[in-house]
Image (cartoon, rainbow, N blue to C red):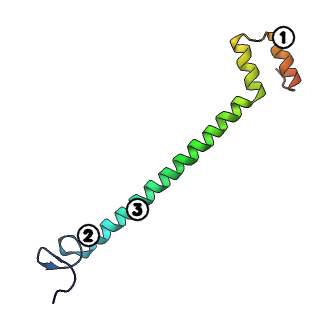
């Protein structure tokens, strides 16, 4: 009658007949799966946060006024008037 798993003629259920290797490899694989899952979740949260932040900056009236002034679409007087209307002090 055969009891358990035989590895290279020795009784045991791990690598080289020692159960500790099987347990260690299982723990390492579990830790690897947890690590990869945490990294993927962090990456998704980071990308989501920064994409929202960039969209909010682009929609900011001050940012739009600065960009238009830098491109030469509006004059300095118009830029200062926009800042004054937005209650920003220069």
Q: CA distance from mark 1 to mark 3?
A: 61 Å
**Under tag 3, what secondary structure?**
helix
Q: Quick check: 42 left or right of 52?
A: left
User: In the figure, 24 relative to 9: above or below?
Assistant: above
Q: Residues within 10 Å of mark 2 (few under 14, many from 20)?
A: some
Residue under label 2: 21
Residue 55 in picture, x, y percent from top left:
67, 34
Tag on residue 31? 3
Q: Residue at x 66, y 37 (%)?
A: 53
Residue 81 in picture, x, y percent from top left:
86, 17
User: In the figure, 70 relative to 85: above or below?
Assistant: above
Q: Residue at x 73, y 25 (%)?
A: 63
User: In the figure, 27 relative to 1: above or below?
Assistant: above
Q: Residues within 10 Å of mark 3 (few under 14, many from 20)?
A: few
Q: Residue at x 65, y 34 (%)?
A: 54
Q: Quick check: 76 left or right of 2?
A: right
Q: Quadrant of the C terminus?
A: top right
Q: CA distance from mark 3 to mark 2?
A: 15 Å
Give the residue furthest to the bottom: 1
Tag on residue 77? 1
| Sequence-wise first label, 1 or 3 | 3
């Amino acid at each position: 009658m055969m009891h358990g798993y035989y590895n290279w003629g020795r009784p045991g259920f791990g690598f080289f007949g020692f159960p500790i290797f099987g347990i260690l490899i299982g723990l390492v694989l579990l830790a690897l799966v947890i690590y990869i899952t945490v990294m993927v979740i962090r990456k998704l949260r980071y990308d989501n946060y920064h994409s929202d932040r960039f969209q909010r900056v682009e929609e900011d009236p001050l940012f739009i006024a600065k960009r238009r002034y830098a491109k030469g679409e509006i004059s300095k007087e118009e830029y200062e008037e926009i800042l004054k209307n937005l209650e920003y002090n220069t």
